[in-house]
Image (cartoon, grey):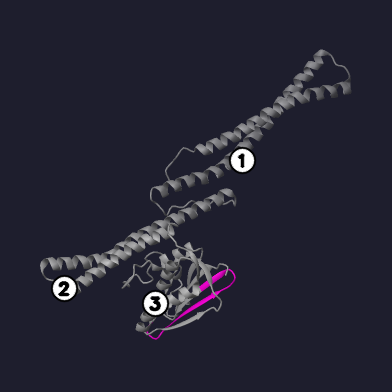
Amino acid sequence: MNRQRPRRLLRRLFVGQLLVILAGAATLGVVAFLVAPPIFHDHVRRAVGPVSDVVARHLDAALSETLLLALAIGIGAAAAAAGAVSWLLATRIAQPIEELSDTADALAAGHLDARATPPVADDELTDFTRAFNRMADALEHTEHTRRRLLADLAHELRTPLATIEAYHEGIADGVIDPDPTTIDVLADATSRLRRLVEDVSLVSQAEEGRLPLDRGRLDLRDLVTSAIDAARPELDAAGITLQFDVADPPVKVDADPDRLAQVLANLLTNAVAHTPQGGTITVVVTSDEHLAVVEVTDTGAGISPEHLPHIFQRFYRADPARSRTRGSGIGLTISRAIVQEHDGNLTATSPGEGRGTTFTIELPTVGH
């Protein structure tokens, strides 16, 4: 990043300023020699009357020498001062651009922590440098996310693959019998792999805006009620109480019922997984003229403030040491992408660890 490079921009800026100075000096000289002699001759005639040719030549010579000397000294001093100022300005303009170029080279070489120093002056070049650094921050974050995604994907794949490999080796060595229990274990591991691949493909399509949606006008209350009915056996088995509060008037939205049902099922499953026995899950549906809101609140483990902004990232773990027993680890990522495809938003709030979590779906409503 600190390598020397020809300072072409600096030279061009300085040479351009010098050309402006030279053009100004030449213009000043031409104007002086065109304007000064007639005025001088007019004042001489008014002051002393007609003069001889010899005196006129001496006066013209004196005027010329005076103009030349004054112009030479004045233009020289002005050029020196202007040249110094031009060099300073050219340096202040060129140096940040050269640093930006070096920083871009460093980023291209893989040094994603490289940043350019913003100029002191608060001008467009400073704004550009700050925008460049924000872009570099985004690139670094994207690269870290990519690396974490690959690492977490490898982790998620390792467990079912290890199970399949171990059982296959056991069957081949005659240690494990291919009985129904073994087949069920292999089927479960294979199903987990399939779900993981499907979920990765689904979230990629959703985040790229390629998720196919079969949208139609529906009552969001009915969809939430169906999702709750489907989740009741799981809720009863976990010993969790469900409270449901729904708005009286119909809540009409333009949505894909299967995709929204997937989101609701994921939020309810997630709430059950993090709520202890005897806890409560509350589902509330409200709406106004423009917005429909579904809130899923649990009294479970909660989320600490430092982890809350990241829970919608792929494979993000608030506790990296905790292994998952179900799911692909990108359910929330898929859910938010689906809701955003419906021109809505999915957010999460939590007072802190041990104090529960609220997931909020916001969707635009349509006319009744």
Callout in the foreground (3, 1): 3
Q: Give whichever of discs 3 and 1 has the lower sequence position.
A: 1
Q: Quadrant of residue 238?
A: bottom left
| Residue for badge 2 | 179
Callout in the foreground (2, 1): 2
| Residue for badge 1 | 85
2 and 1 marks in contact (CB < 8 Å) = no
Question: Is residue 254 in view from this perspective?
Answer: yes
**Mark 3 vs mark 2, CA separation in Å:** 32 Å
332 shown above or below 118? below
178 shown above or below 18? below
- Where is residue 303 drawn, in percent x and y? 43, 74
Q: Quadrant of residue 227?
A: bottom left
Q: Residues within 10 Å of mark 2 (few under 14, many from 20)?
A: few
**Mark 3 vs mark 1, CA separation in Å:** 77 Å
* Secondary element at image label 1: helix
3 and 2 marks in contact (CB < 8 Å) = no
Q: Give whichever of discs 3 and 2 has the lower sequence position.
A: 2
Q: Nearer the viewer, residue 327 or 350?
A: 327
Q: Nearer the viewer, residue 287 or 52?
A: 287
| Residue for badge 3 | 230
Magenta stretch bounds: 276-293
Give the residue type at disc 2.
Asp
Kindly give the residue lying farthest to the top in the view shown: 53
**Mark 2 vs mark 1, CA separation in Å:** 89 Å
